[in-house]
Image (tube, rainbow, N blue to C red):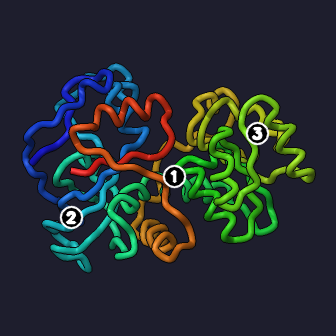
């Protein structure tokens, strides 16, 4: 099969399309003929060597934490899913940038969803669900989402608006209308954020989700009067400020994925805005992510 691989850490140019062995599914896993695979920050950090922290790359690696495709083979113990089914899910530690990939956790793709939308959902959706579970916003409360126009922030906004929570969302000036369309009160991030949020929520905010970084944690702490019910998925300054940095996926379950896919299929939430590129454009996709280009990218074999 064709797959995108890297044998050394480095800039996006280390990503090359190679001929690779088709992987075999293990117990509880399925192999899919990939129709679309999401590009995520973890892939970029893994390729650059940032996550390795100086450890050598043990073997060539195929990135890709999420994919959608048609089941091609099932592992031992798999029930309720058969060859030919359309599914989406998380890969077994990577491998999505390829013509075939193994999914460790998966759910049926509703017919109403495109392959591209289904592949863009698992990683961002899980991160949003995880952060909201920790913050536990309640009906009648006000939640501040920093980075509300992004993949994770946009899902979090919609999940909260749907259950009656007031959401204030920050974004760059060009994306404020998108945040409003998702149902949030929108304000630009940057200097003076705390004052702008106070003007929108005179009674204060009950919880803060930082999905973008941009140095917003000091303002978040000021708005909350401390670090209680403030979390980040993006800002390493959290370790110095005493804010939880939610880096470990803990909600990668079939039930989580079924709920998210169903919500999109029913039109209750919209998936992350995405655009498709070919496998041979993986290096370019990483360059665009590093330049903070807007929108999520999925690779299509």
Is 218 above or below relative to 3?
above
Residue 14 occupies which quadrant of the picture? top left
Q: Earlier in the sequence, mark 2 or mark 1?
A: 2
Q: Earlier in the sequence, mark 2 or mark 3?
A: 2
Expressed as whole percent of the image width and height from the top left, the position of residue 134 reads: 63, 55
Residue drawn at 72 percent across, 57 percent down: 184
Expressed as whole percent of the image width and height from the top left, the position of residue 237 reads: 63, 28
Is any part of residue 2 visible from this angle?
yes
Q: Which residue is mark 1?
A: 127
Say which element carries label 1: helix
Q: Which residue is mark 2?
A: 30
State the residue in front, 173 or 111: 173
Q: Residues within 10 Å of mark 1 (few under 14, many from 20)?
A: many
Is 75 above or below relative to 155?
below
Expressed as whole percent of the image width and height from the top left, the position of residue 230 reads: 71, 45
Say which element carries label 2: strand
Residue drawn at 26 percent across, 24 percent down: 13
State the residue in front, 297 or 39: 297
Q: Which residue is mark 3?
A: 220
Residue drawn at 7 percent across, 46 percent down: 21
Is 164 above or below relative to 197?
below
Whole-number angstrom distance, CA of label 3 to CA of label 1: 19 Å
Whole-number angstrom distance, CA of label 2 to CA of label 1: 23 Å
State the residue in front, 101 or 297: 297
Expressed as whole percent of the image width and height from the top left, the position of residue 83 reads: 15, 73
Outermost right residue: 202
Label number found at residue 187: none
In the image, 6: left or right of 109?
left
Is any part of residue 45 visible from this angle?
no
In the image, 151: left or right of 73?
right
Whole-number angstrom distance, CA of label 2 to CA of label 3: 42 Å
Q: Residues within 10 Å of mark 2 (few under 14, many from 20)?
A: many
């Amino acid at each position: 099969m064709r797959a995108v691989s890297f044998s050394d850490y480095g800039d996006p140019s280390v990503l090359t399309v190679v001929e690779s062995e088709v992987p075999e599914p293990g117990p509880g896993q399925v192999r899919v003929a990939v129709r679309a695979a999401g590009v995520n920050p973890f892939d970029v950090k893994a390729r650059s060597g940032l996550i390795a922290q100086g450890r050598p790359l043990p073997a060539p690696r195929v990135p890709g934490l999420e994919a959608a495709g048609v089941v091609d083979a099932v592992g031992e113990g798999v029930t309720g899913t058969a060859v030919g089914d359309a599914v989406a899910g998380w890969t077994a530690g990577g491998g999505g940038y390829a013509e075939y990939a193994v999914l460790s956790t998966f759910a049926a793709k509703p017919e109403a969803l495109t392959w591209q939308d289904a592949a863009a959902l698992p990683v961002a959706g899980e991160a949003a669900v995880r952060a909201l579970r920790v913050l536990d916003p309640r009906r009648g409360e006000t939640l501040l989402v920093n980075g509300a126009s992004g993949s994770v922030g946009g899902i979090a906004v919609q999940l909260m608006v749907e259950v009656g929570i007031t959401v204030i969302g920050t974004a760059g000036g060009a994306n404020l209308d998108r945040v409003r369309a998702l149902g949030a009160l929108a304000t630009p991030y940057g200097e003076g954020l705390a004052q702008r949020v106070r003007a929108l929520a005179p009674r204060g905010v009950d919880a803060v989700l930082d999905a973008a970084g941009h140095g917003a944690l000091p303002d978040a702490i000021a708005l909350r009067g401390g670090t209680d019910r403030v979390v980040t998925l993006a800002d390493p300054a959290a370790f110095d400020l005493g804010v939880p940095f939610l880096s470990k996926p803990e909600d990668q379950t079939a039930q989580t994925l079924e709920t998210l896919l169903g919500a999109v299929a029913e039109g209750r939430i919209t998936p992350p805005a995405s655009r498709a590129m070919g496998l041979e454009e993986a290096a370019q996709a990483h360059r665009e992510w590093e330049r903070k280009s807007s929108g999520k990218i999925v690779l299509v074999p």
